[in-house]
Image: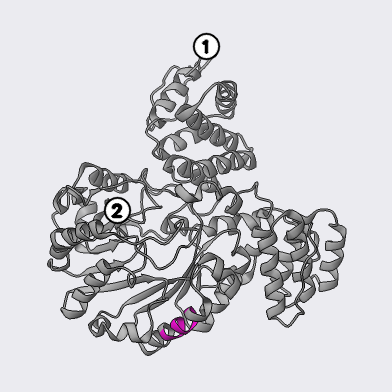
Amino acid sequence: MDFAGQNDHAVFDDAAVGTEPIADPVPDYLQILENIVTHLEDGFDHPEIWQLLSTATPAEIADLRGLTEGLIDRQSGTVLKSLTVLLGLLQALAGDRATGLTTLDRLAVQNAHCPQVAGALFFVQRHGQGGPSPDLSDRFCDSPFVKFETLMDGSVAPCCSIWTQQRLGNLDGQSFAQIWNSESAQAMRASILDGSYRHCNKQRCSFIIDDVLPKRDDVTDPDLRHIIDASVTEMAKGPRWLFLAHDVTCNLACPSCRGGIEVADAEQERRFAIIERDVFGPLLNAEGEVLISVSGQGDPWSSPHYRSILRYMSDHDLDARLDLHTNALLMNEARWAQYPGLEKYLPSVNVSIDSCTPWVYAVLRRPGTWAKLLPNLQFIAAKRARGNFREFHINATIQLDNFHEMPALVDLAETLGADSVRLYMMQNTGGHLEHDFDHKNIGSANHPLHVAFLETLRDERLGRQIAHLYDVANWRTRSFEQTLPSDSLPTNYTLLDLHDAIREAHGMPDRVVALCAAGRTRFSDDLDLLLIEANALAELGFSAQAQYRLNERTALGGEAITLRPH
């Protein structure tokens, strides 16, 4: 760090970052700042530091904030990130919570997978707000102690791969035992037991976001109770949950997932056969019930490797449960009849659809068609209604092209009799997404349609029990905290009130789109609103999204319209 010219700044003497409050009346702030940044170099969450800073006096916080602001412009890399994290925290602790949240929100957009940025933002979101606590030390998560999630690069994760970047090991070159009790596996488990959850992304994990992690004192499972009481990180038993996501073979090329159709080649299939024999075979036949989830990447019905595992399960009586994750385009009645033994596991079926209209589905699930999908959804729904399937869920990854359909996805889930609709924000996983992510990322406060996204999130349907919002819930909470264009309208505004507000917003197309989005939560079938919104979207340069609104208008009985170029 470049601290030139700063050595005469009055700061704390005690630079140790521990559990004692900052209280030295003659502090050496510079030394403390250096020490904190050193601790933050690992990129992990440090709730003990956030809590320590919250015990400082207003004068101490002001001095630390001033020093941080004076240094930050000269930094780069991890030091810049660490100082920005600290600045956001100090801004919030100084009473400027909105500015602190904005600082951390912007940093989170740039570092979506960083547990440290996510953890600092989580602390500011919850600290002193009277709701759920940011302190998770009395909670317990069993995932790192029971789950074995395989990924497409051969690595193994302890839970959902976007909820943590921690990896246990790799299927290529390591035995199951080496992976399951590796140093990184035990570090992940230790972070649960010490209550820091420092490897977890607290802006992504739905159990943390929804505040549903069980209290550790309430855990009664004998094995987990022993783990908690004895602080066990080295597991004597194998996993209870095998989540397969290492084969990316799929019949779709969804833009949120991949740049084109991907199919495992002959060499990969040989590799999968070895993994199936040496890793999964023993796990499938191990003592004790295991939950098999297939597939977190690709589609199980497209993959010869996954179909081989499903065939084995169908032909044998295993002590297992089955979760199927599929796009359902190949999961029809005829295909299901080829695997009659799977029904004994009472499978849970999770279907990723991303849209509930033919025109958006064709873009987001290419080359799939809604006409082919809908009968399969109805087949799955009928199986669920008869009790042949344990659960039925539909999933959508939310982004620019489909955010306006979130309430309608809830309607579809209710019509089908699904157990839930699960909504997730689009993630920047690099690769093909990198060049277009800012354009698609409706969650960014800098996006021209972000306010329209927030207006849509206020729809009451998204608060129903069937709607599981996961990380989308963060933005729904913000939608009620912020002042939006619809707040200028009367509480029980009429369609006439809305049109008056739209006329007043002439020349501000982003505000017009936001007002139309708000209006659709009340007047979903109004053809004029859809036309107004389409024109405003076209004016902003979102021609494809404008066409979606026109298609919806036509489907509702309106005449076909072609917009004039803007």
Q: Position of residue 13 (x, y in %)?
A: 44, 16
Q: Quadrant of residue 14?
A: top left
Crowd around label 1: few <14 · some 14–19 · many ≥20 (10 Å): few
Horizontal arrangement in the rendering, residue 316 relative to residue 360 (left or right): left
Tag 1 residue: 4
Span of residues in magenta: 373-379
Residue 437 drawn above or below residue 47: below
Assign the magenta stretch its main secondary structure: helix
108, 482: nearer the viewer: 108
Q: Position of residue 253 (x, y in %)?
A: 45, 63
Crowd around label 2: few <14 · some 14–19 · many ≥20 (10 Å): many
289, 210: nearer the viewer: 289
Q: Position of residue 449 (x, y in %)?
A: 68, 55
Instruction: Please name the colour scheme applied to the rendered image.
Output: one colour
Q: Quadrant of residue 326?
A: bottom left
Tag 2 residue: 158
Identify the amino acid type marked 1: Ala
Extreme residue toward the front, this view: 266
Q: Residue at x 20, y 45 (%)?
A: 182
Q: Does the image show residue 492?
A: no
Extreme residue toward the bottom, this view: 386
526, 128: nearer the viewer: 526
Residue at disc 2, secondary structure = loop
